Image (spheres, coloured by chain):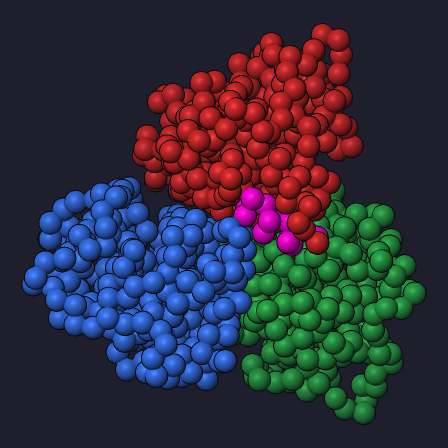
Chain colours: A green, B red, C blue
Amino acid sequence: MTSSDPITESLAWPRPDLLDDLDRLRRKAPLVHCITNAVVTNFTANVLLAVGASPAMVVTTEEVEEFVGIADALLINVGTITSSDAEAMLRAASAADRTNTPWVLDPVAVGVLAYRTAIVEKLAGFRPTVIRGNASEILALNGLSGGARGVDATVSSDEALPAAVELARSTKAVVALSGKVDYVTDGVDVISVEGGNEIMTKVTGTGCTLGALIAAFLPVTGSPLRAAAAASAIYASVGERAAWKAHGPGSFAVAFLDRLSTIGLQ
Amino acid sequence: MTSSDPITESLAWPRPDLLDDLDRLRRKAPLVHCITNAVVTNFTANVLLAVGASPAMVVTTEEVEEFVGIADALLINVGTITSSDAEAMLRAASAADRTNTPWVLDPVAVGVLAYRTAIVEKLAGFRPTVIRGNASEILALNGLSGGARGVDATVSSDEALPAAVELARSTKAVVALSGKVDYVTDGVDVISVEGGNEIMTKVTGTGCTLGALIAAFLPVTGSPLRAAAAASAIYASVGERAAWKAHGPGSFAVAFLDRLSTIGLQ
Amino acid sequence: MTSSDPITESLAWPRPDLLDDLDRLRRKAPLVHCITNAVVTNFTANVLLAVGASPAMVVTTEEVEEFVGIADALLINVGTITSSDAEAMLRAASAADRTNTPWVLDPVAVGVLAYRTAIVEKLAGFRPTVIRGNASEILALNGLSGGARGVDATVSSDEALPAAVELARSTKAVVALSGKVDYVTDGVDVISVEGGNEIMTKVTGTGCTLGALIAAFLPVTGSPLRAAAAASAIYASVGERAAWKAHGPGSFAVAFLDRLSTIGLQ
């Protein structure tokens, strides 16, 4: 991190305002329209149900625009994109932009493969409310937006923070940068979230489902920055607690869903 | 429920005839051809394996007709339908109709989105053996069949029972209506099944996999009404027991598969 | 087994050379490109993460050739093949052949359905490094390659061993034949692996994910025969241990991932 990107706030569960956000989410049970990757479809639905949201995976070009009009929020994750997915994603993103439906873009592996990079660039043009990615993805996407180019899988979230701030400024999206420390920024404020556990890197979809959780918070918090920060803080806390209970990645995923369904209720 | 739809029978596990049905299923290990949604594919296969059936997900237009001729039963669930899925589903349903292969139609979100509603209407024309849905779906599908229109996500299975009876009469299918109380009807008799647990609404696919379980029972019971009722009663019992063991939706799904693999064996 | 296919070696965990293979895998964290079936996508990713590899499911025709050039190994599993999958698989296999990227072919249900049988025959032409299948699949594939025809779902791996040896000779691939006893052969040597547990047949994807594990070992062992044998031996050991902990197929899958993440580390 550079001195030009000061941490405005360091957020951690529990806090009264986070409890309020979570309580609002559970009372509203927002309908979250997910067009996500094939690896995490089931886990994403279960994460959203566990926290109290209503997931709906509607993915075909014939239906996505109609469903964006019904949903409270949209998630687009390009992890296992196919050409028919791409068409559906572009239509859904365009519909979200037109109807002011808040939406999250998760640009998995942008910058690594030419096809998805071109699709992500188009998707980013439909004004995502939040962009969520790891350091490599945020650096790559910022590069496409005219910032410094560079993709390094080993780069830390600290090192990618200036790119996240720059990307937030150029796209007007809130950027949620995942890593050992998570950062959330709207280009002005930077909120840091510590926590989570190393084991989360050994279970597929922990990043992808954080994107879904952010989408679920968008319709219930006052601001996208708040939504992304709340989701990240709750995710980190749930991950930490689940890790205590787990004997490995299998039991971690089970404990994660269990804990997510009760956090803030006891 | 109205007085014109009397409950003929109230079914609950354990009962000797249900034990017989389950035992027959385990000895036959019916091959269940599933064309189901992307969210529940894995869970559906595991539910069928746990109970003792043989799942096979064969989904491409080039193969579905050939495979319907091999399978003992077919499940079609339109949850995440795409246009290529739709073509495969129509071919499979048509083949099942021609070859008298028993099959279950799960019309997820029919009435909510125009595209799938049109496909479901065509699928219903291929004489499904059983139609399984929640109250909203049964009301919507009955509306398409000329009954009273109405879709209300908050409607109870009690309120939708007259529509279920009407739909069974007009389609000649057995209708399995899921809710706090499950109802199964062939348009004459109505069997009610109580049980299950609220937590089942927090795990994705509990309804969808009930459809698969009904399909597994179709080739081993004397009648579709019996198959749907047996599957519902076993499902409710397994759900209840699994809920005792669970600390949340993650451990519930694990306990559900464990229990399903041993119910009736001890 | 016939006397012309002597068992050269009987392999079981633990053994110092297997520990070395596993240690090398964990240090390298090979990037395994998976084009696999819809039922096991999530479980496959979690198995690869648990053992210490890096899974990536890149499946669209526009991206597979580019990604084969990046990946350390490739897995192609035709379980739920569609026509667009077929095109992607053929391009990926061809790219792997051109670039000498080691790859595993899992010909699920070859010989049962005409469409996939034709695709598998084409895929087999791109010189897979390893072919993994059950007895029926190996017999069917060997039949296509000019050996004796015959598909019998109830045939044992012992009975299919001569076909496995013949297939290895005609294709120059290592053949990994799964069953109560697993056999791995390059057409000259035959390595047998005992172990595992009956419950593995009640969880979807245990065979399919063995194919992924073999792919993960290909870039880190000296030979494909060694890679397939190491993966099979580790799989059998993990399956046995997980079965001790499990109360059914649900908790087995959880314990399997947990154990896979720690085997060899304590």
User: Which of the 4 quarters of the picture holds residue C60?
Assistant: bottom left
Place of residue A12 in the rendered image (x, y in percent of width and height, measured from the top left): 83, 73
Outermost bottom residue: A3
Q: Choose between C10 and A137: the one closer to the eye.
A: C10
Place of residue A167 in the rendered image (x, y in percent of width and height, measured from the top left): 72, 76
Q: Main secondary structure of the magenta part?
A: helix
User: Which of the 4 quarters of the picture holds residue A65?
Assistant: top right
Give me the residue at 68% from left, 32% from top.
B195
The answer to whether residue B48 is left or right of residue B210 is: left
Place of residue B183 in the rendered image (x, y in percent of width and height, measured from the top left): 65, 23
Q: In what quadrant of the picture does the N terminus of chain C appear?
A: bottom left
The answer to whether residue B122 is left or right of residue B248 is: left
Outermost right residue: A16
Residue A168 visible in the picture:
no
> Magenta stretch?
B248-259
Place of residue C126 in the rendered image (x, y in percent of width and height, measured from the top left): 24, 64
